[in-house]
């Protein structure tokens, strides 16, 4: 049983140093504790490990066999300590991360190069998918998510980065053909490219600068949960779509997209990371989390 490991450890010390008194002097572990641990081990195993009297100390034959196994345990434990010390000395190893497609193509592509340069012995294994993963059962170190409703799992730690808003975009050529918009209700008569992919009839919720809310019923011509695809379609005059600024910025700079109804926005969700309890985090994982907080948190 795992509870016996301390007993094996104390027994190995006594044998290694040739007696209880010698082991006490070498380790500062009280002789009484060493004796009690060895006695417990003998009781649990049901065999005599050491023949002892006031003047005599001898390890039995079975005791020597047990000592050899105890040495293996001690060496394995020391190797585990050495491994962790090695990791602490210089962060290394593999970090397994789950993240949405849009975050991978934008935020991660922006911040990851400098991290890899700073920590060349850390490898990053990315699962790029909009699927919600089971972090613990699937063995992920970190999951990056954008959600309106945050995780409430007590076994997970949550770090918020920022609340992300979306804005309406279209190409100028599309607006020239189908008409400019003056108010949110005009969206009902336009060709909409939607992130939602479950229903044909959808409700678009917009907020103005005063947090006034309007709900507009739309019937999208394209539905697909890939913001990069929707941006590309909008830039090719297919319709109006909601995009985050991080995705739309390059298209805006080239003039391929323009903002529609600029005073209105739509909440996209809270960008955050979740990961298992802080206890036992490998140094590489802890460093990466700190790096994310530094580079993704809006100041």
Image: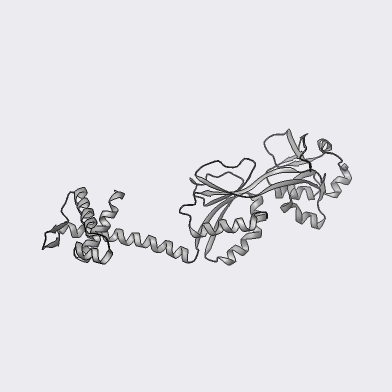
Is 112 located above or below residue 151 in the figure?
A: below
282 displayed left or right of 130: left
Q: Position of residue 22 (x, y in %)?
A: 21, 66
- The residue sitting at 66% across, 55% down in the picture is 107
Q: How is the image coloured?
A: one colour
Which corner quadrant of the image does residue 69 belong to?
Answer: bottom left
- The residue sitting at 59% across, 66% down in the picture is 117
The quarter of the picture where the C terminus appears is: bottom right
Q: Position of residue 282 (x, y in %)?
A: 48, 57
146 displayed left or right of 41: right
Q: How many numbered discs?
A: 0
Q: Position of residue 15 (x, y in %)?
A: 21, 62
Q: 267 and 104: which one is in front? A: 267
Is 242 located above or below residue 251 in the figure?
A: above
Which corner quadrant of the image does residue 126 belong to?
Answer: bottom right
Which corner quadrant of the image does residue 241 belong to?
Answer: top right
Q: Position of residue 161 (x, y in %)?
A: 63, 51
């Amino acid at each position: 049983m795992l509870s016996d490991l301390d007993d094996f450890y104390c027994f190995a010390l006594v044998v290694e140093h040739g007696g209880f008194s010698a082991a006490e002097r070498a380790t500062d572990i009280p002789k009484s504790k060493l004796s009690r641990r060895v006695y417990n081990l003998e009781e649990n195993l049901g065999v005599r490990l050491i023949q002892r009297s006031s003047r005599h100390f001898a390890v039995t034959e079975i005791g020597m066999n047990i000592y050899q196994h105890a040495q293996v345990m001690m060496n394995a434990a020391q190797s585990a300590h050495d491994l962790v010390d090695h990791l602490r000395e210089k962060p290394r190893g593999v970090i397994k991360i789950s993240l949405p497609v849009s975050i991978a193509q934008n935020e991660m592509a922006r911040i990851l190069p400098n991290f890899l340069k700073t920590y060349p012995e850390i490898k990053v294994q990315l699962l790029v998918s909009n699927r919600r993963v089971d972090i613990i059962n699937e063995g992920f170190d970190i999951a990056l998510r954008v959600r309106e409703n945050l995780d409430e799992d007590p076994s997970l730690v949550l770090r918020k980065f920022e609340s992300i808003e979306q804005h309406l975009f279209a190409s100028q050529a599309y607006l020239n053909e189908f008409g400019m918009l003056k108010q949110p209700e005009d969206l009902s008569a336009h060709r909409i490219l939607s992130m939602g992919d479950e229903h044909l009839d959808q409700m678009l919720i917009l907020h103005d600068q005063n947090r006034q809310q309007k709900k507009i019923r739309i019937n999208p011509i394209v539905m697909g949960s890939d913001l990069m695809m929707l941006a590309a379609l909008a830039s090719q005059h297919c319709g109006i779509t909601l995009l985050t600024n991080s995705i739309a910025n390059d298209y805006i700079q080239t003039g391929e997209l323009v903002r529609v109804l600029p005073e209105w926005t739509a909440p996209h969700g809270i960008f955050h990371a979740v990961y298992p309890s802080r206890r036992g985090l490998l140094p590489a994982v802890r460093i990466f989390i700190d790096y994310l907080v530094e580079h993704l948190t809006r100041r």
